[in-house]
């Protein structure tokens, strides 16, 4: 309960839950990562925009790159129908969605990187010559 009061990066806060309840938001669907998607029942500003507001409540850490492309398109009103009603047609060559791993143990570290597990590769850098300006 204490975490829900003060840690916005762990799912939802009481303020967000209250806003969803106050606006009469309905659960539209859930993705494979457990993120839940909501849409308000009536547009909150009928004069300014007839579009209904949409929200994502992250399952775990709030990281925007964890939203799959089909749900991202729905959140940003690119698609009218949510992926639960009109799923994306995936191609055979498409890879599964991966969130941004920067700053985690699963981050990509190229050969020669000091952060690479096991240390930098000794074979990298043998053909490197430092540039010095002609003066």
Image: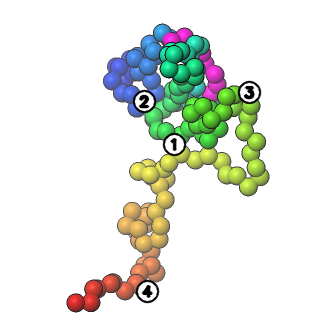
Q: Residue 71, percent across and down?
A: 62, 34
Give me the C-alpha separation between circle 3 and circle 1: 22 Å
Identify the element where label 2 is drawn: loop
Nearer the N terminus, badge 4 or badge 1? 1
Numbered badge on residue 118: none
Q: Which residue is drawn at 73% across and 34% down?
A: 87
Query: Residue most toward the bottom?
Result: 135
Residues packed near mark 3 inside 10 Å, few (<14), some (14 to 19) or many (20 plus): few
Q: Where is residue 116 in the image (x, y as percent from the top left)?
A: 43, 64
Distance in Å between CA atoms under marks 4 and 3: 55 Å
User: Which residue is label 1 attached to?
Assistant: 65
Q: Do the residues labelled 2 and 4 touch (CB within 8 Å)?
A: no
Which mark sits nearer the N-terminus, 2 or 4?
2
Alpha carbon separation for disc pair 2 and 3: 28 Å
Neighbour tally class for label 1: few under 14, some 14-19, many 20 plus, Cα within 10 Å: few
Regarding residue 38, the answer to whether it shows in the image is no
Residue 60 is at least partly visible in this image: yes
Q: Name the residue under label 3.
A: 85
Above or below, 16 relative to 75: above
- Quadrant containing the N terminus in the rendered view: top left
Front position among marks 3 and 1 = 3
Residue 50, quarter of the rendered image: top right
Q: Is the magenta stretch mostly helix, strand or loop?
A: strand
Q: Which mark is residue 10?
A: 2
- Which residue is drawn at the image coordinates 66% and 33% (left, top)? 79
Q: Name the residue under label 4.
A: 127
* Numbered disc 4: secondary structure: loop
Residue span colored magenta: 23-30
Q: Which badge, 3 or 1, is on the more N-terminal residue? A: 1
């Amino acid at each position: 309960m204490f975490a829900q009061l003060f840690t916005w990066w762990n799912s939802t806060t009481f303020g967000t839950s209250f806003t969803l309840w106050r606006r009469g938001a309905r659960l539209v669907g859930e993705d494979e990562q457990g993120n839940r998607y909501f849409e308000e029942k009536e547009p909150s500003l009928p004069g300014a925009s007839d579009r209904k507001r949409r929200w994502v409540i992250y399952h775990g850490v709030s990281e925007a790159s964890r939203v799959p492309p089909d749900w991202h398109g729905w959140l940003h009103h690119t698609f009218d129908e949510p992926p639960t009603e009109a799923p994306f047609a995936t191609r055979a060559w498409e890879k599964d969605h991966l969130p941004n791993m920067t700053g985690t143990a699963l981050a990509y570290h190229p050969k020669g990187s000091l952060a690479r597990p096991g240390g930098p590769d000794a074979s990298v850098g043998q053909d490197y010559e430092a540039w010095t300006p002609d003066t």
